[in-house]
Image (cartoon, rainbow, N blue to C red):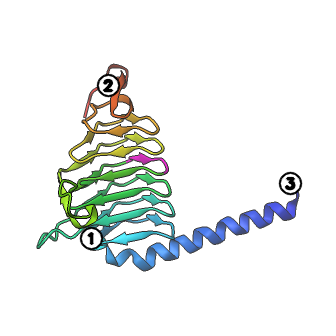
Amino acid sequence: MNALSRLFLVFYRGLLRLRYKAFSLLISGGFAQFGKRTILESPLRLVGEERIAIGDRVFIGAGSWLQAIPDGDNRSVAISIGSGSSVSGTCVISAVRSVVLEEDVLLARNVYIADHMHKYTQTDTPIQAQGLDKIAPVLIKRGAWLSQNVVICPGVTVGRGSVVGANSVVTQSIPDFSVAVGAPARVVKSFAQSAGTSA
């Protein structure tokens, strides 16, 4: 690689960093909380940002969708993303009441997390007109890693330091320090003893 190409790439990366920092600064005041050194890459789809809290040093990649769905008179935080977490591009986090990512959570691309499902039992009504159902809190504990294309269903807890394999659909909670894979996901390995069990 020649010197001109290297110089251009340094300039290009610096320009992108500046752009995303400016974008993050301009929108930060609309959130319930927006931490220091947090970067949101545009384009980004946002709904109900006044009910979204984001900690320090969080990264959210381009093409992601953060959605806090209206819940009557409820104005409490519906989505909480802990400090040090990294959300790769094209992820969806959708909540009516509670989706919590604790500190240092890692989401690969195309992860989908929701604390609700669509109703679908009224055969004479389009599904999108039936409203929401099965609303239950979701918790992704500290240090967990959700691989590419993972789906997290309502009511699920993913344990501390656990790994969910690519393309898995998580319908049941996963213990701390575990590896889970499949659709539906099941635990295939536990490393709690080697990792230690202290909180």
Percent coordinates x, y for residue 156 in the rendering: 24, 42
Residue flagged by tag 1: what amino acid is it? Ala
Residue that badge 2 annotates: 196
Percent coordinates x, y for residue 119 in the rendering: 20, 56
Labelled pair 2, 1 in contact (Cβ < 8 Å)? no
Q: Which residues are magenta?
A: 104-109
Is residue 23 visible in the rendered structure shown here? yes
Q: Residue at position x 13%, y 69% from top?
A: 74
Of the image marks 3 and 2, the number of the one nearer the N terminus? 3
Q: Residue at position x 30%, y 49% from top?
A: 102
As measured in the structure, the alpha-carbon distance from the residue carrying label 2 to the one carrying label 1 is 35 Å
Q: Residues within 10 Å of mark 2 (few under 14, many from 20)?
A: few
Residue that badge 1 annotates: 32
Is residue 97 visible in the rendered structure shown here? no
Q: Nearer the viewer, residue 168 or 68?
A: 168
Q: Residue furthest left?
A: 73
As measured in the structure, the alpha-carbon distance from the residue carrying label 3 to the one carrying label 1 is 45 Å
Residue flagged by tag 3: what amino acid is it? Met
Q: Secondary structure at mark 2?
A: loop
Q: Residue at position x 43%, y 46% from top?
A: 106
Residue that badge 3 annotates: 1
